[in-house]
Image (cartoon, helix red, strand yellow):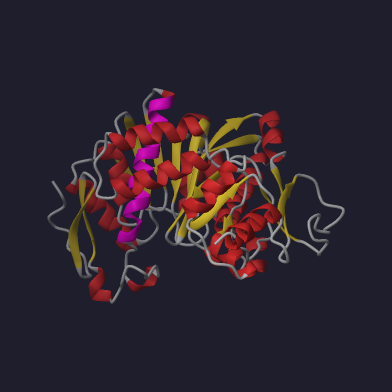
């Protein structure tokens, strides 16, 4: 039974999400609308927009548990009102223990109430501690977790070091970043400070954001002799999300570091390329202009086809109100897994050339007929990934305009 003696000191309401019910702040009492993400408006942070994120997380953890075929332990050290961790315990088979923690007094009390409301006291342990403290306290080999979920407001970087140390070998680290302004190049210096890489304000900045976060994770993990493989990542709404499986061993760490590099970009002709080693020249090979760069960042694969396939299987047997949206996202990501890094945005290209913008399907068909691999991308509804040069894509667009 829930603690009948607990009465929150702020306006609240019971909501249903997935298979659970939780007490959360009544956001309308604080003038909060879905586009607001400021946690200070309510005494305990709760964002209904992130239900989509939580749904996908449940599916991804189910897929991971299916692949490793053993009982799993999960830690969510920034639990707030507890809805994420409570859903993990209630909806994922094979979860033997879930450790939740929050340093905020109101959050701790609310999460404690919600655990009891869902009768999960036997499976969930709740602590009232700082996130890094709770992770550090579980860094001993016998205490480590199979999965750690870092879902902060803002940057996850302050928690990465302690999270990697608290993960078992082959464990899964899921990380959210909502500070897209630095990652997308609006505040470049902040990005360099936090993530150790230089961003760029390009049309494909959301993919750069994922790669900057991934590159930062690899660098932090390598300090502990840990290699990283990225199983799944996506950009949705106001955040990016990365799922990484770790592998103990200095050789694994060295191999991961080899996939950190740079993306060079020409703002004149929109040429872009990836390089692993520091570059000796920034002269664009297509138009001769001086190029800019982003990085160091991750230039390897940001998703694994087999893992995405298993997430799709889990989604097919699960009914969420976001299922249709999730299906579309997973289908797009699976199709673009093997596509080159970065993407072209049709409106950007057409505007540069002063030609009408064709439909996505029209340009994809034309590129495929010309012998290129071309797919849409989930990063941008008007974006395409293609193994063709910027000049080739622009020439094709010009030709399509001339034929009309």
Residue drawn at the location 35% of the way across and 56% of the way down: 50
Residue drawn at the location 58% of the way across and 62% of the way down: 401
- From the viewer's perspective, tell me whether residue 291 is left or right of residue 396: right
Residue 379 lies, with reference to residue 75, above or below; the image says: below
Task: Name the spot of residue 285 as percent of width and height, x first.
Answer: 81, 54
By secondary structure, the bulk of the magenta-drawn segment is best described as helix
Q: Is residue 62 magenta?
A: yes
**Of the pair 342 and 41, the residue shown nearer to us:** 342
Can the viewer see residue 14 in this picture?
yes
How many dots with numbers?
A: 0
Residue drawn at the location 68% of the way across and 55% of the way down: 390
Task: Name the spot of residue 264 as percent of width and height, x first.
Answer: 73, 55
Task: Name the spot of residue 231 as percent of width and height, x first.
Answer: 51, 37
Q: Residue furthest front?
A: 403
Residue drawn at the location 55% of the way across and 60% of the way down: 346
Can the viewer see residue 187 in this picture?
no
Per the rendered image, the range of residues in magenta is 48-67
Q: Residue furthest right?
A: 280
């Amino acid at each position: 039974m829930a603690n009948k003696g607990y009465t929150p000191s702020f306006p609240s309401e019971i909501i249903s999400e997935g298979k659970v019910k939780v007490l959360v702040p009544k956001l309308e009492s604080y003038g909060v609308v879905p586009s607001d993400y400021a946690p200070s408006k309510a005494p305990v942070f709760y964002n209904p927009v992130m239900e989509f994120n939580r749904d996908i997380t449940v599916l991804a953890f189910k897929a991971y548990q299916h692949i490793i075929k053993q009982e799993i332990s999960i830690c969510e050290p920034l639990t707030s009102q507890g809805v994420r961790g409570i859903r993990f315990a209630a909806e994922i088979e094979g979860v033997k223990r879930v450790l939740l923690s929050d340093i905020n007094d109101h959050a701790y009390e609310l999460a404690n109430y919600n655990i009891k409301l869902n009768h999960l006291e036997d499976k969930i342990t709740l602590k009232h501690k700082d996130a890094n403290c709770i992770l550090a306290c579980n860094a001993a080999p016998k205490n480590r977790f199979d999965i750690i979920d870092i879902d902060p407001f803002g940057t996850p970087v302050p928690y990465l070091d302690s999270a990697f140390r608290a993960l078992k070998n082959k464990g899964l680290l899921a990380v959210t970043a909502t500070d897209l302004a630095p990652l997308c190049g609006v505040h470049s210096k902040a990005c360099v400070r936090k993530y150790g890489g230089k961003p760029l304000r390009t049309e494909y900045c959301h993919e750069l954001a994922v790669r900057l976060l991934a590159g930062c994770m690899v660098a932090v993990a390598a300090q502990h002799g840990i290699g990283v493989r990225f199983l799944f990542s996506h950009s949705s709404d106001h955040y990016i999300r990365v799922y990484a499986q770790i592998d103990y061993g200095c050789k694994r760490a060295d191999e991961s570091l080899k996939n950190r590099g740079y993306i060079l970009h020409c703002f004149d002709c929109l040429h872009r390329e990836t390089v692993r080693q520091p570059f000796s020249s920034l002269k664009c090979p297509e138009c001769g202009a001086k190029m800019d760069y982003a990085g160091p960042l991750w230039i390897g694969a940001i998703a694994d086809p087999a893992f995405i396939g298993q997430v799709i299987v889990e989604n097919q047997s699960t009914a969420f109100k976001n299922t249709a949206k999730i299906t579309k996202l997973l289908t797009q990501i699976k199709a673009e897994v093997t596509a080159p890094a970065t993407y072209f945005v049709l409106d950007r290209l057409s505007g540069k050339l002063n030609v009408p913008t064709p439909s996505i399907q029209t340009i994809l068909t034309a590129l495929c007929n010309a012998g290129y691999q071309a797919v849409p991308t989930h990063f941008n509804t008007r974006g395409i990934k293609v193994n063709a040069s910027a000049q080739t894509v622009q020439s094709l667009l010009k030709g399509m305009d001339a034929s009309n």
